[in-house]
Image: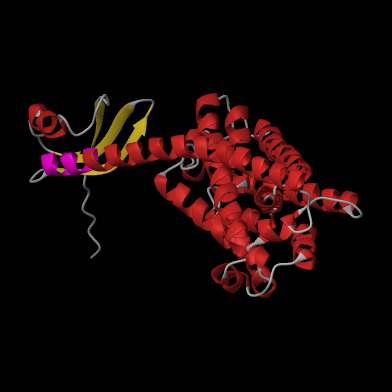
Amino acid sequence: MSRFGEALHGGQVDANEIARVRSVVMFEEPDLQARLVRFFALLVLASAIATFGLYADSVATVIGAMIVAPLMLPIMGLAFSISVGDSKAIATSLLVSAAGIATAIAVGYLLSRMMIGVVDVTTINQVMIRTAPRLVDLLAALATGLAGAFAIGRKDVSDTLPGVAIAISLVPPLANVGILLGAGEPRLAAGSMLLFATNYLAIVLTGSFVFGVMGYPAAAAEGASRRAKGVAIAVVIVMLCIVVVPLGLTSVKLIERTIVERRTSDATKTWLQGTGYRIISVNVDQGRVAVMVSGSGSLPERSLLERSLRGRIRSYPVRIEVIPSTYIDAVTQ
């Protein structure tokens, strides 16, 4: 292990340290059944809390669900398994993750069936902001993967893992998928699933990287046969490719969308200067830029905006929704 890796870990990585980390993040015997019962019990509760928090449009309740949710463990278990090239542990972590994902979606869906006709989910802010990943979500997930692996890899900071779980949105977007499926909004549900997938892949990627820098792969390979080392390296390369390719594609799309939204916003602000209108929102949706403005009075000529946007955004038609504003002065004396 390099000096940097040893300093990052806070000590030498050996067989005992690998066993300690495995006991934290892996679902293995002898306490496999107890760990699974605890995992799914907490996950069902967290999913229910997240679902009701989303319906209530309550940020505090959604954060509470993040604290309870145990989904970070199998994800970090996958990152650790990839870093040490353990194919059996990779399969186990993937299986537990998949079962957890299905459980969270199912809870959101079942609870949403109770709310049909009572609440229009498309009017709930906490639901709608989780229907598409943004660049900031990707960056937060990358940082969370770094923090999660660091917290698990060092015994002296392992108690910060709940704080790491709060930093990333895992169970809420899955509950959101169930809610939107139950409400008959599969397109929006797909956006929430993409948000979760982006977070999941980013955590796995950066978590594997930190475990690798700390020296876990080298320590795991000590004493192993040449064939076992080769298999471990091959598994790491394949899994990293599986993670990097979709994450890279998602990142490119997120960056492009962010650039289009920023350029459209800047052009629209310039277009509205000196008028009684202001921008409410700018969003890229289904290959089109939707701009919402509010105010009163006359709008500038459309050609001025078109000229400003021409060449700055490619193949993105822009639609502007104008909401008239009415001002009422209240006499207080």
Residue at x-position 90% and y-position 55%: 31
Q: 89 above or below 123?
A: below
Query: x, y (%) of residue 108?
Result: 66, 38
Please name whichever residue, 174 or 71, is drawn nearer the observer in this view of the structure. Answer: 71
Please name whichever residue, 212 or 21, is drawn nearer the observer in this view of the structure. Answer: 212
Left or right: where does residue 38 sit relative to residue 285?
right
Which quadrant of the structure image shows residue 252?
Answer: top left
Query: Quarter holding the N terminus?
Result: bottom right
Query: x, y (%) of residue 56?
Result: 57, 47
Q: Is 308 inside the magenta-drawn segment? A: no
Q: Residue furthest front?
A: 226
Query: x, y (%) of residue 217?
Result: 67, 56
Query: x, y (%) of residue 111?
Result: 69, 37
Q: Is 269 inside the magenta-drawn segment? A: yes
Question: Is residue 164 among the parts visible in the rendering?
Answer: no
Q: Start and end of the magenta stretch?
A: 264-272
Residue at x-position 67% and y-position 50%: 49
Prevailing secondary structure class for the magenta stretch in the rendered image: helix
Query: Quarter holding the C terminus?
Result: bottom left
Q: 111 above or below 223?
A: above
Residue at x-position 68% and y-position 72%: 12
Please name whichever residue, 297 or 85, is drawn nearer the observer in this view of the structure. Answer: 85
Residue at x-position 62% and y-position 70%: 9
